[in-house]
Image: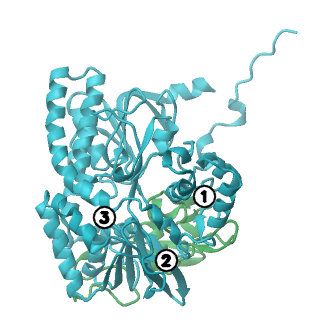
Chain colours: A cyan, B green
Amino acid sequence: MSKVIDDNVQKIDVVVLGAGPAGVAAATIASEHGADVAIIDENISGGGQIYRAPPKEYETHDSFKSPESYEGDRQRNYLSNSKVKTYFNYRVWSISQELVVSTISANGLKSWRPKALILANGALERIIPFPGWTLPGVMGLAACTILLKSQFVLPGRSTVVAGCGPLLMSVAYAIVKAGGNVSAIVDLSSKSEWVRVFPKMLSRPDLLLQGMKWLWKLKNEGIKIYNGYTVTKSEKDNDRLAITIAPFNHSGVNTDPKFQKLVEGECLAIGHGLIPSTEITRLLKAKHKYDLLKGGWVPVIDDEFRTSIPNVFIAGDASGISGAFSAVHKGRIAGLSALRDLNMISLKESKHKINNERNLLNKTENFGQAAAYLMRSRPELIKTITAETIVCRCEDVFRAEIDETIVSGAVDMNQLKAWTRCGMGPCQGRTCADSIEAILTSVVGSRELAGQWTGRAPLRPIPIEQIIGDYSYSDIPIPESAPL
Amino acid sequence: MENYLNNKDDLRVAGNNVTRNSYVTVTIDGCEIQAPAGEILAVTLFVNGYRTLKYSPRIKEPRGFFCLMGSCQECVVLVDETITPACQKLVQEGIIVKTIKI
């Protein structure tokens, strides 16, 4: 059996996982220096979520294009003109200790064994639960962005946009631009928080100006913006959602429990920031540390983006949230480090080039860090998770059950999982891990004590008949009987 | 405000800004539906009013798509009898889609 699999494993210099800005940068720089590189992504083309391409069958008028769509086209062209081998629509479902990367696609199973593995698998959206967050019509801000910018579809005839960070204004503006209605913007960040990050945002006057333009347009449309508010409940009211909001201060404490306000919309688009995706680094048992301003748990890296696992590098938001512009430089540094470790570039050249990229990264990170600050985890927000709120959507686990289990003596994340089934469903805990860690942390005192769920394969659910392929009963090797 | 909508019930942005060149026919829960070639299946379901795609395992509450990027698994449906996240699948001529009723 193991021989059958080994024959199909392709040896290669570098595999890059994720074809967003970081992955494209890492793959192309490695390829330009002579490395044989494959880039794998489960989406149909490059660009990641931020530069996601519209369907190639659609024609979009230039007036409907954004700076991001041009940058996405530029990166996709750059990748397709390079020597990097691209594998789109390939889903990675396992990575072994020997770094054998196993994928599944319409063409069946395919595996690689790279000398260096660069992870550029991006981020997940943090959405802190509240009663009614599981209703159809409630979606993530990232989902809403995909609908608007890559599908040209409105999330509803009216939408409440809620949460925190720059995605709020970006989504609200995209809805208005597409001719839709925004019934309210509910921003957890107070005006003073925005003022606090203003100096860092000045590092990118172009983006700051774009943001101001969005804000002006939204105010001009008469859209009410609630700063320092959060959603505490969402209820179905015929074909609309009745959404209760309440004032919360900057550490997430409800400042006036008596004051509530009702807003409504057909859709509620909500997001509380981005979390670096750690499913692969956990699977590989890399060292992690919790860093609030990087979005949560991040792999421990050296200053050239090497993880604690030999020959595994990380780039982009997966190494800490700092945005698409930083991701390019992080990707190039990771690519150069991989080249150096494969001895495909001299020490002098790699140092020189990495230094250049680091200077550029320092500049772009200012803006990214301002955004990451606005999107940071607010520990007190877990108060919106009432006892009757479902925390783990896949397994319908309620907050009350999590609390009872902690009272009964569960002291880490894996115990909570074993006792309640939270995080055991098809999403593998990607949706609820951060909220459940926050709940447990409020009792045990720190994220380090709460720990993380053990990474497990398969990374995505895959039908078993697809893994088996055309392997049949008769292919099972029968060992010769031992002599009696 | 320019009206980019074909009609008030159509959430697909249209007008002169986006042209959907070709259409395919898919069958959703027994109904034949036209959808623009290239559209994500989860989006086709959404704009046609299929908001509930499955029910949760324990308390059986309705669920629809949530993350739209292959992470949350809330939008899984049967496509030609294979369980598939609808957000990771593009519409294709002739596919038979069933939402999950249990």
User: 10 Å neighbourhood of mark 1: few (<14), some, or many (≥20)?
Assistant: few
Kind of element beneath mark 1:
strand
Q: Nearer the viewer, residue A167 or A34?
A: A167
Kind of element beneath mark 3:
loop
Residues at discs 3 and 1 both on one chain = no
Q: Residue at x 46, y 86 (%)?
A: A260
The number of callouts visible is 3
Q: Quadrant of residue B43?
A: bottom left
Kind of element beneath mark 2:
strand
> Label 3 belongs to which residue?
A54
User: 10 Å neighbourhood of mark 3: few (<14), some, or many (≥20)?
Assistant: many
Residues at discs 1 and 2 both on one chain = no
What is the chain letter for disc 1?
B
Q: Is residue A346 visible?
A: no
Q: Which amino acid, mark 2? A: Thr
Q: Give how far apart the Cα atoms at labels 3 and 1 are.
A: 26 Å
Residue A18 in the image, given as x and y percentages of width and height: 36, 46
Q: Which amino acid, mark 1? A: Thr
> Label 2 belongs to which residue?
A232
Q: Are discs 3 and 1 less than 8 Å apart at CB?
A: no
Q: Quadrant of the N terminus of chain B?
A: bottom left
Q: Nearer the viewer, residue A155 or A441?
A: A441
Q: Earlier in the sequence, mark 3 or mark 2?
A: 3
Label drawn at residue B82: 1
